[in-house]
Image: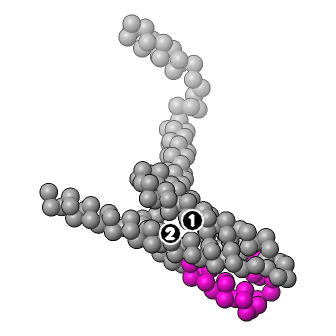
Amino acid sequence: MIECLLTAAAEAGQDAPAEAADPLFYIIQYAVYFAIIVVGLIVLWLLHKKTKLPTHAALRAQMNAAAQSLEQYIKDTQEQAAGKYRLFRRANKLQAKCNKLYYYATMLAEKERDSSMGSMALILDEARDGVSAYRYSALEDEADIRCLYASLGKLREALATLDSIAERDRALLAKKAEK
């Protein structure tokens, strides 16, 4: 059987054109394969880096930044420091931040199978809804900013939940270290 395969391979080699036997052809062919593999690995690395979930500390920092942005936005809205269109654009950015925080919290809850993180994700969803509700009324003359205050309260509540999760994790690590 092996002899049959060897003779078939030898006959196939005889049918190949003479140019294909040139070593430069094979070098170029393997260089192209190598380049394709390297580009594929770079794309995979970039996808991994882009979709990597943040740590609890990084999530807390992002939530603090979102809360500070929301506080500044409320202050600017009350003082009419910027035009309505600029405030509308900032409301869109705030909603995007809230969307990102909600996504991260949801994915972390799913990854860690943590119901406390899931409840924090629901709180962030409520904060996102408040910013969204204001965003659509931001261009009106008498826009109601109570929903922004509610969203700020929800963000602070989510921060407190994240702090309790971190405290619980520290206690579990200390208990595990004692064993």
Residue at x-position 51% and y-position 46%:
37
Q: What x and y, as percent, mark residue 103? A: 56, 59
Between 108 and 130, which is closer to the camera in this rendering? 130
Scheme of image coloration:
one colour
Q: Which mark is residue 158?
A: 2
| Magenta-colored stretch includes residue 9 | no
Instruction: Check disc 2 and report its element: helix, strand or loop.
Output: helix
What span is colored magenta in the figure? Answer: 67-90
Q: Residues under labels 1 and 2: Cα distance?
A: 6 Å
- On screen, residue 128 versus residue 27, left or right, reads right
Q: Is residue 10 left or right of residue 89?
A: left
Q: Give the main secondary structure, helix, strand or loop, of the magenta stretch.
A: helix
Evaluate whether residue 70 shows in this view: yes
Q: Residues within 10 Å of mark 2 (few under 14, many from 20)?
A: many
In the figure, is residue 135 to the left or right of 169?
Answer: right
Please name the residue shown 50% across and 59% down the image.
Answer: 119
Q: Are marks 1 and 2 in contact (CB under 8 Å)?
A: yes
In depth, the one of 43 and 57 nearer the eye is 57
Q: Name the N-terminal-most of marks 1 and 2.
A: 1
User: What's under tag 1, amino acid-wise?
Assistant: Leu
Disc ID at residue 61 = none
The residue sitting at 14% across, 57% down in the picture is: 179
- Judging by the rendered image, the residue that carries numbered circle 1 is 124
Q: Is residue 87 magenta?
A: yes
